[in-house]
Amino acid sequence: MMIAIHQPHYFPWIGYLDKMAKADKFVLMDTVQLEKRSYMLRNRIIDLDSNIRYLTIITETQSHYNYEYRGIKTKNFKEWTDKQKGTLIWAYKKSPYFDEIWEAISPIFIEEREYLCDITIQSIEILRKLFEIRTPLLLQSALKIDKSYKKDKLILEICKAAGADVYYSGNGAKKYMDNEMFEREGVHVIYQQFEHPVYKQMGNHKFEPGLSALDMLFNCGIKRARELFWNQVNAMLT
């Protein structure tokens, strides 16, 4: 069984969803600490003026980097949701697909949730539905592991607890992964192969990769975005 592992991200990019779609199970690391300037509470889009804009969730700031991710609380719901709605409307209102995508993501701006983790996982579930990704999700907190481990040792613990014999890793982990350690423990490591789909973005700028998957959805619509996504997934699997 092949698993992939990642922290929850807010409306993650296509590469994140690609890794999820290719795995047999996807583990969300909800007991790690929040990383500074990470996508664990924000993500990026590009507006009509070709400016990168951030969609950011406001959290309680007092010592929140010392808490487990699942224990971080949000605040000022109306403030951050109103700001995000304004940013998205400015960037994508002229898209012919605006209404269908807005309806799909609107629960994020309506259903107030206390914890950051609940919001980011809700955003992931919305994208999973839109892209028809059926890979089961597991929470790290539901697995019996030694949380004192860090980096590749923690990843290996999660793999073993989840019953994996293959770990599907992002390429960024190569700098700290001890592949031989995994092999000794019966877990084979495979690194993600991913080519970002190119599509027409609104505005007069060259294609900007790595944005939230919302950008593809607003620019292409659900049907075309899903087609582009699965064409890429299936091409890399063959």
Image (spheres, rainbow, N blue to C red):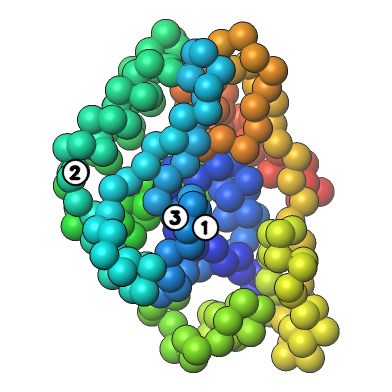
Q: Number of labelled discs?
A: 3
Cβ atoms at labels 1 and 3 below 8 Å apart:
no
Query: Considering the numbered disc 3 on the image, is that residue within a helix, a strand or a loop?
Result: loop
Q: Is residue 72 visible?
A: yes
Question: Which residue corresponds to mark 1?
Answer: 135
Residue 126 falls left or right of residue 152: left
Q: Nearer the viewer, residue 165 or 35?
A: 35
Q: Position of residue 30 (x, y in %)?
A: 40, 69
What crowding class fits label 3: few (fewer than 14 Cα within 10 Å), some (14-19), or many (20 or more)? many
Question: Which residue corresponds to mark 3?
Answer: 40
- The residue under the point 77% across, 87% down is 181
Rendered image: mark on residue 77: 2
**Kind of residue at badge 2:** Phe
Dot 1 or dot 3, earlier in sequence: 3
Q: Give the vertical position of 37 relative to 187 (above or below).
A: above
**Kind of residue at badge 1:** Thr
Q: Nearer the viewer, residue 147 or 105?
A: 147
**Kind of residue at badge 3:** Met
Q: Quadrant of the N terminus?
A: bottom right
Q: Nearer the viewer, residue 101 or 29?
A: 29
Query: Considering the numbered disc 1 on the image, is that residue within a helix, a strand or a loop?
Result: loop
- The residue under the point 38% across, 16% down is 90
Q: Nearer the viewer, mark 1 or mark 2?
A: 2
Q: Position of residue 233 (x, y in %)?
A: 69, 44
Q: Is residue 129 visible?
A: no
